[in-house]
Image (tube, grey):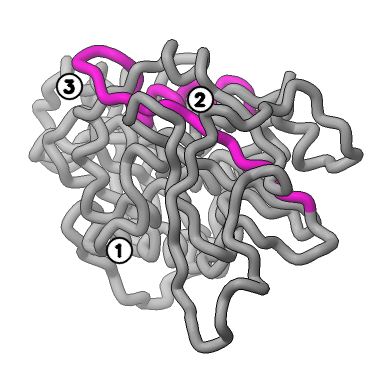
Amino acid sequence: MQSILKIFQDLNQFISSNSDGFNIASLPKIKNHKIGLSSQGMPVFFIKCEDGDKERILDYNLEFISVQFNRECRLLSEDKIIAEGSYTVISLRTESIDLQEYFLEIVFLVVQKLSPIATLKELKFEVKKLINLFNKFTQPPTKTIQGLWAELLVIEQSKTPEYLIKSWHCSPNDKFDFNDGIDKIEVKSTAKSRRVHSFSFEQLNPNKNSNLIIASVFAVETGIGKTIFDLVKSIDLKVKSIDLLTHINEVLIETLGKDFEKTFEIFFDYQLAIDTLAFFESEIVPKIESSNIKQEISNIHFDVDLSNIEQIIKIKTNSTLHKSLIK
């Protein structure tokens, strides 16, 4: 299937002589909704609306995206009118090819969820989620690029990526990277020469009926390697659920915030990471015992060297989450 970016780029090759309409192209497997080219050369999505929905809704105008509801549009293909009517217009505004490609994919996932002729109710719901997501671009990051890259590598290398994604950062208050409500996985990365990681006291002390595995990755920046988005593309090929792909994008944007654009230029040594990816039972990882901590002391963090700790070769529990890890 032709990529959304390629469809958009092909629109740039045709210069319309008609200033009263938008030059557009069809979207893969989508009947009425279209992608187009703005007068500034930016991507625009046209969402076909019910003609009866003329309720005036407040438009959105953000740094990277704008949404205009219920606009009468004339859509052209090589200067021939192919459609007219009421559309909700989603415009993306960035000259960065990397950001254009990523934004196109995000909005296309939203479009695939909509009815062939979208109702006002579903448009409000999906657009609100989209706007909330794009608002995250102005917020500070909640994790390092290295840490997020390591988590995506664990998903990309896993036996069952779908289950891991379902369990990945489902709650912003969760202290573990993966939590299916029963068991946990915490991912640690390092760029040092030894497998030394920083832990909080809570990260090595889950509730007593939960099993916790520590995933350890050497994530070293290189001039040539794989970025976060290279890993996302690899995961996309293995996952068919639109909801899971949307969840990946939500976690990325919520985690990276205003550091999002930097990630296109930061590469990590992919082969080193694969070769050194290791898993450890939390029970045998050295830790500070709760009996040694006075009740008045909190916010405890410490470094642990896992270099000589026994690695997990085969998952021996019946944990669905943990069995998803190792192929």
On the question of residue 26 being in view, the answer is: no
Q: Are marks 2 and 1 in contact (CB under 8 Å)?
A: no
Q: Position of residue 203 (x, y in %)?
A: 58, 58
Q: Position of residue 212 (x, y in %)?
A: 71, 49
Q: Nearer the viewer, mark 3 or mark 1?
A: 1
Could you tell me how far apart the alpha carbons at marks 2 and 1 are, in whole angstroms?
Answer: 28 Å
Amino acid type at image mark 1: Asn
Query: On the image, numbered disc 1 is attached to which residue?
Result: 135
Question: Which residues lie in the magenta part?
Answer: 211-239
The residue closer to the viewer here, 178 or 113, is 178
Q: Residue at x 49, y 47 (%)?
A: 110
Residue sitting farthest toward the bottom:
296
First in sequence: mark 3 vs mark 2: 3
Element on which disc 3 rests = loop
The residue closer to the viewer here, 133 or 49, is 133
Amino acid type at image mark 3: Asn
Q: Position of residue 326 (x, y in %)?
A: 72, 24
Q: Residue at x 24, y 12 (%)?
A: 224
First in sequence: mark 3 vs mark 1: 3
Q: Is residue 18 above or below residue 233?
A: below
Amino acid type at image mark 2: Pro
The reply, left or right, for residue 189 in relation to residue 7 is right
Residue sitting farthest toward the right:
318
